[in-house]
Every structure is written in C-alpha cells, then in structure tokens.
Image (spheres, grey):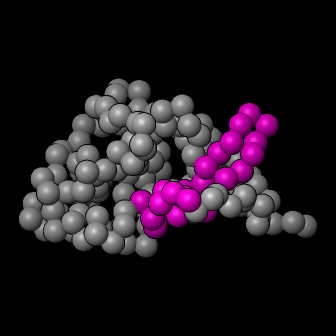
C-alpha cells in the first residue's frame, strides 16, 4: 500500500497553501492580537495561547503583490509547531485536509528566494496547492529578531 502525506489546506488572498498535518496543533477563529515592538515585519503581534505567548505571522508580508491588511473577524489562526517554537498563521479560511501520495510533490523553480520556503506543490482537481516548509516561515535573521522582541517584551 502506498503511503501518503496529510496536508491542512488554507486560503490566503485567493491562493491555496498547505502545511503538513503533523505540525498543526489547532485552527480557530482569529482573535485580537497584541503588537510586538521590534518583531520582524511578517510577525503582526502575539496572542496568549493557554498562558503561552505565541507569535502571529501574516504571510501577506512576503507576497510581492500582496498587501497586508488588518485581521478580519472571519480570519482563522492556524497554530503550528516548528523546530524553534509554536506560531500562529493568519489565514483567510481553513479549507480542510487532503491526502497526497508521499513523494509526489512537484518541485518549485528556485529562481525566486520564496521557492525555498516551500516543500513543493500538488495539483488537485480544484487547483494548485503550494505546500509550505513550516521551518522556513522565518529566516535566521527574522527568527533572531523575534527572539529579541519577545525577550524585550517579557
């Protein structure tokens, strides 16, 4: 029997993205965030998640043609475990879970720096889904800046 990967699909500015389900802790309605001075541009603030301060990332800040916008009442937070910490991603909508055969993700061209942030892409009946590498949401410089901002806020 062929093994498969389970992915959680979400929508952001009309584009479908996914992350591996093993990194997802939960998905819930967006809540008010607290600004975090000194954080990287794509960290829009923090939330209190059961007593833990959790950074909130908005990937719109990375898109060349995407414009950041305030968190909307219909948005979702996808809470993920990365190698360094727990984070929450802003999504317009969580669309559900899909299964893809292991090893079938198509590689993305490495012409742009952003391609390195993805494991690949999968073509589904209803369109293309880009699969994020959760450990690449922040580069080393951004991760260090986030740690400093969190320490300064404590």
Would residue 90 be visible to someone looking at this image?
no
Residue 124 falls within the magenta-colored stretch: yes
- Above or below residue 68? Residue 136 is below
Between residues 83 and 66, which one lies in front from this camera angle?
66
Counting the numbered discs, the total is: 0
Between residues 63 and 134, which one lies in front from this camera angle?
63
User: Which residue is at a point 60% across and 54% down the rendered structure image?
Assistant: 131
* Percent of width and height locating residue 114: 48, 56
* Quadrant in the picture for residue 81: bottom left
* Percent of width and height locating residue 38: 14, 57
- Above or below residue 115? Residue 29 is above
Residue 97 falls within the magenta-colored stretch: no
Residue sitting farthest toward the front: 111
Quadrant the C terminus occupies: bottom left
Quadrant the N terminus occupies: bottom right
In this rendering, position of residue 79 left or right of residue 147 = right
Between residues 80 and 68, which one lies in front from this camera angle?
68
* Percent of width and height locating residue 108: 64, 58
* Percent of width and height locating residue 61: 35, 45
User: Which residue is at a point 24% across and 56% down the rendered structure image?
Assistant: 40
- Above or below residue 78? Residue 149 is below
* Quadrant in the picture for residue 150: bottom left
Residue sitting farthest toward the top: 73
In this rendering, position of residue 121 left or right of residue 117 = right
**Magenta-tinted stretch:** 111-137
Would residue 31 be visible to someone looking at this image?
yes
Residue sitting farthest toward the right: 1
In this rendering, position of residue 58 left or right of residue 27 = left
User: Which residue is at a point 26% across and 46% down the rendered structure image?
Assistant: 44
């Amino acid at each position: 029997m062929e093994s498969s990967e389970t992915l959680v699909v979400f929508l952001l500015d009309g584009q479908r993205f996914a992350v591996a389900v093993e990194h997802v802790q939960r998905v819930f309605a967006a809540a008010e965030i607290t600004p975090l001075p000194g954080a990287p541009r794509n960290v829009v603030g923090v939330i209190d998640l059961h007593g833990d301060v959790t950074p909130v990332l908005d990937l719109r800040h990375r898109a060349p043609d995407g414009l950041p916008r305030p968190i909307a009442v219909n948005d979702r937070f996808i809470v993920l475990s990365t190698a360094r910490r727990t984070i929450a991603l802003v999504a317009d909508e969580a669309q559900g879970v899909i299964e893809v055969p292991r090893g079938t993700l198509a590689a993305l061209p490495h012409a742009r720096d952003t391609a390195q942030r993805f494991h690949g892409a999968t073509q589904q009946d209803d369109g293309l889904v880009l699969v994020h590498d959760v450990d690449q949401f922040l580069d080393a410089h951004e991760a260090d800046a986030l740690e400093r901002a969190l320490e300064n806020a404590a």
